């Protein structure tokens, strides 16, 4: 189950996109309200659409996180720093995009390419 949870841990408010399972929950992405002067819904839609630049940022402990940034360099959404390599980080970004699609009322399936 995908849930959009209000986040009050950071300055202001924002959201955490969470995948809940029978044994717990994983944070797929998060943001702070007003990031780039956008509403939470706009930031989630930009994540869904990949509307920005995706980069990988290393934490001091060597783990990576993905960040989606806008033209101004402001962070639109980001993952927790829990990934060991860029391939897993890229896959986690794709998972977060699918979850954002579901959270905004869409389907988690991709259309078939019928060329």
Image (cartoon, rainbow, N blue to C red):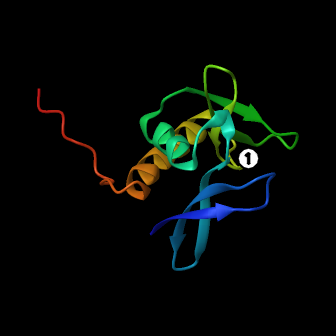
Residue at the limit of the structure toward the bottom, as seen here: 22
| Picture quadrant of residue 105 | bottom left
Q: Which residue does the image show at 60% across and 69% down from the upper left?
A: 25
| Picture quadrant of residue 38 | top right
Q: Quadrant of the N terminus?
A: bottom left
Q: Is residue 113 above or below residue 12?
A: above
Q: Is residue 71 above or below residue 63?
A: above
Is any part of residue 34 visible from this angle?
yes
Q: Is residue 47 above or below residue 40?
A: above
Q: Position of residue 53 (x, y in %)?
A: 57, 24
Front-lying residue, 43 or 23: 43
SS class, disc 1: loop
Q: Classify residue 11 as left or right of residue 42.
A: right
Q: Position of residue 29 (x, y in %)?
A: 60, 50
Residue behind mark 1:
81
Q: Which residue does the image show at 51% across and 42% down from the upper left?
A: 42
Q: Which residue does the image show at 56% across and 36% down from the upper left?
A: 87
Q: Position of residue 73 (x, y in %)?
A: 69, 23
Local crowd size for mark 1, using a 10 Å CA cut-off: few (<14), some (14–19), many (≥20)? some
Is any part of residue 67 visible from this angle?
no
């Amino acid at each position: 189950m995908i849930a959009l949870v209000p986040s009050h841990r950071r300055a202001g408010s924002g959201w955490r996109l969470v995948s809940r399972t029978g044994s717990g929950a994983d944070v797929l992405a998060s943001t702070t309200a007003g990031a780039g002067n956008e509403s939470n819904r706009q930031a989630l839609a930009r994540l869904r659409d990949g509307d920005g630049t995706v980069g990988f940022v290393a934490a001091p402990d060597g783990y990576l996180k993905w960040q989606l940034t806008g033209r101004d360099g402001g962070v639109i959404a980001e993952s927790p720093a829990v990934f060991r390599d860029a391939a897993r980080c890229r896959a986690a970004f794709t998972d977060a995009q699918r979850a954002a699609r579901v959270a905004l009322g869409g389907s988690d399936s991709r259309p078939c390419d019928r060329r």
